[in-house]
Amino acid sequence: MICYRVVCSVDAARADEWRAWMMRHHIPAVLSGGLFLSAEFFQDTINDDAQRVIFCSEYRCRSLEEYETYKQHHAPRMQQEVKELFGDSFRCERSLLERVGEILP
């Protein structure tokens, strides 16, 4: 299992707009490509910076090949759309995680 994680710091003045757009448009659009199995969307509740709000999107796919297909064929268009809508009011960091185990109680 692969987890594609995107952590974004958004200007507080645009945080509500960002949250709504991500949940109503962007995340469903990413999932509609059929490469990711699921997604989760989080907001950091212990962020001390009143000027910024931190959001984290996590997308799950079965293989690195599926992620690479997304990265090559879909990500540039998706990232451009975000830039056009939100300009310089956000910054994102991306990481790719491979599941190495599950520990249950």
Image: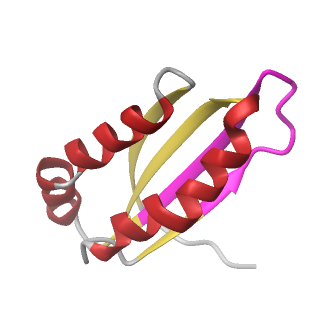
Question: In the picture shown, does residue 11 fall above or below 96?
Answer: above
The figure's colour scheme reads: secondary structure
Asked whether residue 1 is in view, the answer is no
Region rendered in magenta? 41-59
Residue 95 or residue 89, whichever sits in front:
89
Location of residue 70 in the rendering, given as x and y in whole percent from the top left corner: 20, 58
Q: Is residue 55 magenta?
A: yes
Q: Is residue 61 left or right of residue 101?
A: left
Residue 20 drawn at (x, y percent): 64, 57
- In the figure, is residue 18 to the left or right of 36? right
Instruction: Identify which residue is drawn at 37% across, 34% down.
Output: 84
Query: Which residue: 84% across, 45% down?
Result: 45
The x, y position of residue 48, in whole percent, is 87, 26
- In the displayed structure, 35 sits above or below 70; it is below
- Residue occupying image coordinates x 41% and y 40%: 82
Is 3 within the magenta? Answer: no
